[in-house]
Image (cartoon, helix red, strand yellow):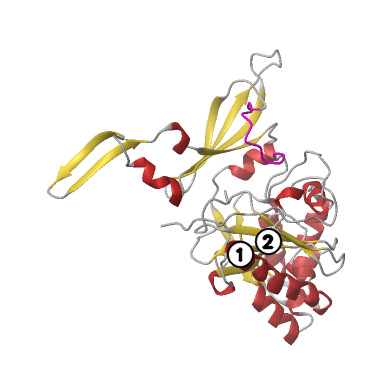
């Protein structure tokens, strides 16, 4: 059963937040502004499903591509992606599902066992809804289910193939800078070390609704710009990495009463966006990207750099790419050429 999250008093800021809406989520160029309890409307009219891009019965999530605004004189309308996800149970509310006379439909009964469809009241039937609008072909491909392939990238591959490919892409991370500059989501910051070189902000990931601790998920985003990924790390960055590990764990213990030995603290490679950030998740939560082919524990990253200053410039790293990803083809071609 999920644990209830303690009350979260607002933390004092070093700077006043500017009231500016801006993109605000990982792995998404088009995001949402700061949260509000005021009822709002979707940013488009109508939604006609074109395709189910991906779905997971285990995770209770579905990704839909739809046409919107078809009645506004814009020709065939515009593309949008809508992600629907069932939210986790909350301790303080779950009892209400069975109190009184809940609406039930019997599925089967056998001896002491019975199964029902239970229809919760409106206030307990929330579905988290994420909107990407207007969506580009890049967004549609991003959320489309594709087969994965493992690739082993040498340090040479990174320098000669991966890095030039990344630099050729127009990958905006303005939403990251908006968070760091307090232009968006300033009220969501859990902790900040303001040092421009070795500091960071700690903020809940939007995949976590902050209502229970079972799926706790926060992101530490470093203030220092120009550190793209694990490949850029050298001993120069050890003070920053140690601050993130130590202060991040302390902040989570203070705010959520979750100790460091119940946290998984790691970096992704390849990351979903190229500004250094570190993931903090509950140890028992199977977070997306926490598998061995992508996650690198921060404590081990620190130890590797202490032992070998050029570890991440030289080491061969294994990760998964979608079968249609152009980078996969480029790396495969480079490796084939090397073995001729």
**Residue lying furthest bottom in this view?**
307
Residue 35 included in the magenta stretch of the image: yes
**Residue 289 position (above or below residue 74):** below
User: Going 66% across and 51% down the picture, which residue do you hit?
Assistant: 325
**Residue 121 position (above or below residue 281):** above
Ranked by sequence position, the earlier of labels 1 and 2 is 2
Residue nearest the viewer, comparing 261 with 56: 261
Residue 210 appears at what percent x and percent y? 57, 51
User: Going 67% across and 49% down the picture, which residue do you hit?
Assistant: 27
Q: Secondary structure at mark 2?
A: loop
User: If the image is split into quadrants, where does the N terminus sit?
Assistant: bottom left
User: If the image is split into quadrants, where does the C terminus sit?
Assistant: bottom right
Residue 176 appears at what percent x and percent y? 78, 51
* Quarter of image, res 148: bottom right
Q: Which residues are magenta?
A: 32-42
Residue wearing tag 1: 294
The answer to whether mark 1 and mark 2 are in CB contact below 8 A is: yes
Residue nearest the viewer, comparing 43 with 227: 43
> Dot 1 surroundings within 10 Å: few (below 14), some, or many (20 or more)?
some
Which SS type dominates the magenta stretch?
Answer: loop
Residue 209 appears at what percent x and percent y? 57, 48
Q: Which mark is residue 270?
A: 2
Mark 1 to mark 2: distance in Å? Answer: 7 Å
For the question of whether residue 89 can be seen, the reply is: no
> Dot 2 surroundings within 10 Å: few (below 14), some, or many (20 or more)?
some
Residue nearest the viewer, comparing 168 with 279: 279
**Residue lying furthest left in this view?**
111
* Quarter of image, res 167: bottom right
* Quarter of image, res 83: top right
């Amino acid at each position: 059963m999920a644990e209830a999250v303690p009350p979260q008093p607002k933390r004092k800021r070093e700077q006043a937040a500017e009231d500016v809406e801006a993109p605000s989520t990982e792995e998404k160029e088009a995001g949402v502004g700061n949260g509000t309890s005021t009822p709002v409307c979707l940013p488009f009219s109508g939604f006609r499903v074109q395709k189910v891009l991906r779905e997971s019965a285990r995770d209770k999530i579905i990704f839909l591509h739809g046409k919107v605004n078809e009645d506004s004189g814009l020709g065939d309308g515009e593309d949008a992606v809508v992600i629907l996800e069932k939210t986790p149970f909350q301790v303080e509310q779950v009892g209400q599902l069975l109190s009184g006379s809940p609406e039930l439909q019997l599925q089967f009964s056998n001896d002491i066992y019975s199964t029902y469809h239970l229809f919760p009241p409106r206030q307990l039937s929330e579905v988290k809804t994420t909107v990407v609008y207007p969506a580009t072909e890049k967004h549609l491909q991003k959320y489309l289910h594709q087969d994965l392939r493992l690739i082993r990238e040498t340090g040479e591959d990174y320098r000669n193939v991966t890095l030039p490919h990344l630099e050729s892409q127009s990958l905006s991370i303005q939403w990251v800078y908006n968070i760091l500059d307090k232009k968006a989501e300033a009220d969501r910051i859990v902790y900040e070390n303001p040092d421009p070189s070795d500091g960071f902000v700690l903020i809940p990931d939007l995949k976590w609704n902050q209502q229970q601790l079972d799926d706790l998920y926060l992101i530490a985003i470093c203030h220092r710009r120009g550190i793209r990924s694990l490949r850029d790390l050298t001993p120069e960055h050890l003070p920053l990495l140690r601050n993130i590990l130590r202060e991040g764990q302390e902040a989570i213990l203070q705010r959520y009463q979750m100790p460091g030995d119940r946290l998984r603290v790691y970096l992704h490679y390849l990351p979903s966006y190229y500004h250094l950030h570190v993931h903090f998740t509950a140890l028992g939560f199977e977070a997306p990207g926490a598998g061995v082919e992508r996650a690198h524990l921060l404590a081990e990253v620190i130890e590797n750099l202490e032992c070998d200053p050029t570890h991440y410039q030289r080491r061969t790293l294994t990760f998964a790419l979608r079968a249609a990803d152009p980078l996969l083809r480029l790396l495969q071609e480079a490796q084939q050429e090397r073995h001729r």
